Amino acid sequence: MPLLEFTDRGIYCPLAGVYLDPWKPVDRALITHGHADHARPGHTHYLCTEAAAPVIRYRLRLENNLQTVKYGEPVVINGVHFTFHPAGHIPGSAQIRVEHQGEVWVFTGDYKLENDGVSEPFELVRCHTFITESTFGLPVYRWKPQQTIMDEINGWWRQNRAEGKVSVIAGYTLGKSQRIIGNVDTSIGNIFLHGSVDNILDIFRAQGMVLPKTQRVTTQHKKQDFEGSLVICPPSAVGSPWIRRFLPYSLGIASGWMSLRGARRRRGADRGFALSDHADWESLNTTVRETGAERVYVTHGYTEIYTQWLREQGLEAHAVKTHYEGELSEMVEGEEKTNPDPVEEQENTTGGTAT
Amino acid sequence: MKNFANLFTALDQTTKTLGKIDALVDYFRQAPDADKLWAMALLSHRRPKRTVNTTLLATWASAQAGLPLWLFEESYHVVGDLAETITLLLPPPRTASDESLTYWINFIRALEPLTIEEKRAQIYDAWSRLDHTERFVFNKLITGGFRMGVSQQLMVKALAKHTGTRETVLAHKLMGNWTPDQNTFTQLLEEEQHDISRPYPFYLAYALEDDVTTLGTPEEWYAEHKWDGIRGQIIVRDRQLFVWSRGEELVTDKYPEYTVMLDLLPDGTVLDGEILPFLDDRPLSFNHLQTRIGRKTLSTKLLREVPVAFVAYDVLEWGGTDLRERPMHDRRAILETICAQSHPVLRLSALVTFATWEVLAAERLRARELVSEGIMLKRKTSSYRTGRRRGDWWKWKIDPLTVDAVMIYAMHGAGRRANLYTDYTFAVWDQGQLVPFTKAYSGLTDDEIRAVDRWIKQNTLERFGPVRSVKPELVFEIAFEGIAKSSRHKSGIALRFPRIRRWRQDKPAAEADTLESLRLLLDER
């Protein structure tokens, strides 16, 4: 019996009877992080890191059925050892290491190698079998250092300010927003947040994350309050009536997809910033190599292509069909991942109508 | 090249017309004359000839990047642009260069006589000396198809702002046969030119979207049929004939029938009109003309089967005098004297007489039977303007034909639509089978495109490289302008200007149209 197997509900450990990031309701679910394609509603019991728990609890409206562990703290279920290790993807995100009688598997969920200053930095975990995402598993994706991208964002903000425009930047509420707020040059001006960004930020602040001062956009604000400031909103707010209050504004979009000119032009944004919370081509290759894994399963992204590439590198690689979307939904669909659960819909709506 | 790369970045980073004009003016202010001239050439579709084929470039780029060719190709499918794919995959440059745009264009042109090995060495050298954006521009120059989101009209606007010359004058000066090799910037823009082949910029009409009665009284307007050929300009000067197509292409040799113009027209004559296939006193469909386009040699058989005439709409120059500022009714009077004698090759575009808009509307409905695309409306007092303008000229096209079809294949688009499934193949029913009959790329809103894209990704049956076959489930109404028999298509038919009119979410696939119903629409000619 393999330690982990791929079922139509999710990744399953038959020895322990638990699922990792399942997409259909199950009894016991181990969750890597709070993005909607990984943390889904409807499971009976949830287990995740302490750092990821508050957001997951908030987003899924969980009460007493969420258990937490610290990074590195083992959980033993029926002789199988599970540990969570930082994935560097977003604050609180984890890879899950699964060990039984010396055999080690690692499931990454989503990950990136660069230390972004707000997420727990990625930790390399050696293993025999590695389950990796491949959101940007094509050699055309090569990220510039975060500081370079932040310099671009700062420069754009300064220029907009000089031209009397508001700078509106769209990025995921969970992850991208904290990363921008935590790294942008706050001496340029004020930072305003869309309701759904602010909600998540409140949770992180309560957890002890130290971030610069921000303000929530409310109906009380007048047009002149926004002058020269930076506004952070989810991708779904782009093109909505909500955004019109910032006119005249320049629209920036922060996403790995923005490294392609076609995607930038399609989004009709003034600027695209190639800032991604996922591993780029080089990082994927580095990680696969350094885990020492002999066998690799490739999940969401350019799955078939990356699998083929790994095979040509002499590895045993398999493509796996999952329901994870990576950053795909961020740009291709033009809106933030939405959860089929009505609670999540409701949250988005509340955030969107802070008018 | 730095200037030009910066211009490119500036243009790429703004979606606003004014921002683009400012960026161009900035560039014109800084760039040396030779570079300016090349920038103008590139932005008016005067590209250097391709000297290296794209397969070689792809092979060399993958070799430099240390990647297998299949992975390069997969990357290209996702990026949707060859020059950009190469740029993204190459290792970082080794040195920097400060050469001009003109230097790099000449560098590319000098590759022509070299052997493949020599070309490769040169290309590697260039790649190693250019930074990211410069490389992209260089790759764009070499692969052709240089588009920077700037129309010729916009470039002329910026140039007018830079030089302080009137836009219409500049537009005219930039028409025709100039090249950066034979002309200097000053020569081209400031001196009187003696190029006798030089055409006038075409005046183009917008489609009439409002009700026709909003145009005022019928007496103010001329109406004529909008013929479905290729818009062209006939120039007779110094006993020489020049035929230009709207794409600013000199096509004199393609239409030997027009040699007779030298007998029919005196020197100093320029006519605007339609290059139209005409047989037995009746126009043929555009489909027939298409058989002549792109042919290097015209067989006597083809000339016999698809002879062309020139249907004259307007006269722009007469007796060597530019008439464009004169009102349309004056020009029309002159045109009628020029075409007074009916001739099978030079034909006057007849006016439609109409006392009321209702009469004209009825005539418009006859358009398909007359093989025209609808009605053109021109204000009697209008001058002949430059480029596409609103107000005085309108095209009032007939409603398209439509068919409800099932999507069976999807491919991702290029450029702005790369990585998004936007190019669809449609099928209709024939004896219980779905037969593909057309592709269509446009017509959906961005929201619909995203929804369809998502549906495609979830309902893929098979993948063949960039193409996916999908569950035959979604029905779309396809609009088109014409339909003709075609031996090149499995369905036996070919559509003209197919596009998606709407997504029929109300219609199940089983209720889509049949091939038989399409065949009934075939023109018996």
Image (tube, rainbow, N blue to C red):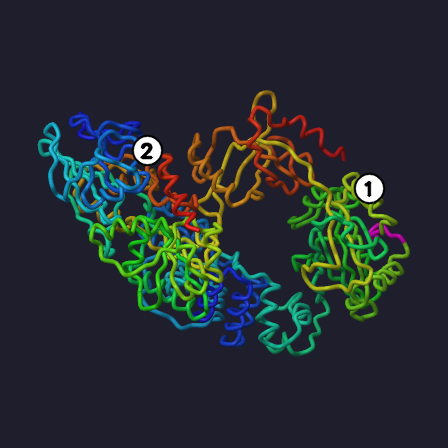
Provide the chain ID for the residue under circle 1: B
In this rendering, the answer to whether B369 lies above or below A238 is: above
Q: Is residue A335 magenta?
A: no
Residue B221 at what x, y percent from top left? 82, 56
Crowding near the residue tagged with mark 2, few <14, some 14–19, many ≥20 C-alpha atoms within 10 Å: some
- Image point 23% across, 27% down: which residue? A27
Say left or right for B25 vs B291. Answer: left
Q: Which quarter of the figure has residue A108?
A: top left
Q: B317 or A25, which lies in front?
A: A25
Image: magenta residue range? B342-350
Residue B99 at what x, y percent from top left? 42, 72
Provide the chain ID for the residue under circle 2: A
Amino acid type of the residue that numbered disc 1 sits on in the rendered structure: Ala
Q: B149 or B213, which lies in front?
A: B213
Extreme residue in the front direction: A220
Crowding near the residue tagged with mark 1, few <14, some 14–19, many ≥20 C-alpha atoms within 10 Å: few
- Image point 49% across, 51% down: which residue? A241
Q: B521 or B70, which lies in front?
A: B521
Q: Which quarter of the figure has residue A320?
A: top left
Task: Describe the element under mark 2 as helix, strand or loop.
Answer: loop
In this rendering, the answer to whether B292 lies above or below B216 is: above
Which quarter of the rendering shows the N terminus of chain B? bottom left
Residue A95 at what x, y percent from top left? 20, 42
Q: Which mark is residue B435?
A: none
Say left or right for A115 vs B426. Answer: left
Q: Which mark is residue B362?
A: 1
Q: Does the rendering let one see residue B72?
A: yes
> Which SS does the magenta portion mostly show?
loop
CA distance for labels 2 and 1: 59 Å
Q: Does the rendering let one see residue A314?
A: no
Task: Tell me the residue that label 2 is attached to.
Answer: A321
Which quarter of the rendering shows the C terminus of chain B? top right
